[in-house]
Amino acid sequence: MLRKSYFSSKHRIKTVAEQVDFLRLTFPGLGFANVKIAERKLPSDAMGLLALPRYEKIAPTYGKAMGKVLMLISAERKLELANLSLEKLGPQYLRQIPLTALMFQKINESQEGFDILLVPFGLGYGGWGNAYNVQESMDENEFCLDPFSVGIMSLTHPVEPDYLRDDFWINCAGCESSPDGNGEFNYTPFFRFERDYFYNRVGFDVMPKIFGIGGSTYAIGFLPNSA
């Protein structure tokens, strides 16, 4: 359950139409979303709807789609990759956790025929600690978002660090990583956004699942309410 919202009047959640228009301009040939979902009441604690292209509509694999998103981010800011690289985004390095994969399967099936999925989401910070704590704190209709979803969110809703902080972390606890590709998925990917007078950059990296960062941000999705 969300503890505190990141979005405020300064960080407005875009309308479905705004997000869909942006995605269709960014990924030529992309179809539409089921806009009727926007008429439904949001789940409790959800802050809005996030428009997400089906990854297979922009690349043949999840890893290649993730690579495209990172390249788009790098066009706007300096991109820094440490333990991961554009060559280390395949299934032996990065995979969704079972709950996140199951929830996206349900959403995919319920929005069949549409290239862009509409997913209720929330983004908050504080109180949960490491990835295990986050994953175990999900309510029945909640799930942790993955880096593809968070990357798309950062494109449709550019993330700017608070003026009192020089960096802003978003943990992607809906995925787990094996940086060496050895089959041990003991790491969680995260984005780190940094900005001051001298630089404007974003890092994509991993940390051990057992580690937590005080005040870090987490992103969660919700199953849409029925019509």
Image (spheres, grey):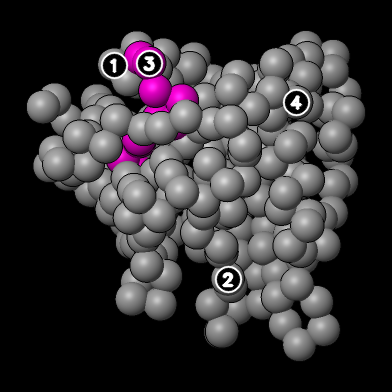
Q: Report which residue position mark 1 lands on.
A: 110
Figure check: 10 above or below 52: below
Q: Position of residue 107 (x, y in %)?
A: 35, 21
Tell me the element at label 4: helix
How far across and how far down the image is residue 190, in percent?
65, 45
- Residue of label 4: 64
Q: Is residue 100 left or right of residue 206?
A: left
Which circle marks residue 160 in the picture?
Answer: 2
Q: Quadrant of residue 154?
A: bottom right
Residue numbers of the magenta segment: 112-121
Q: Position of residue 99 (x, y in %)?
A: 43, 19
**Element carrying mark 3:** loop
Q: CA distance from mark 2 to mark 1?
A: 33 Å
Task: Please give the residue where the numbered disc 3 appears in the rendered image.
Answer: 113
Disc 1: CA contacts within 10 A as few (<14), some (14-19) or many (>=20):
some
Q: Residues within 10 Å of mark 3 (few under 14, many from 20)?
A: few
The first of marks 2 and 4 along the sequence is 4
Sequence-wise, the earlier of marks 2 and 3 is 3
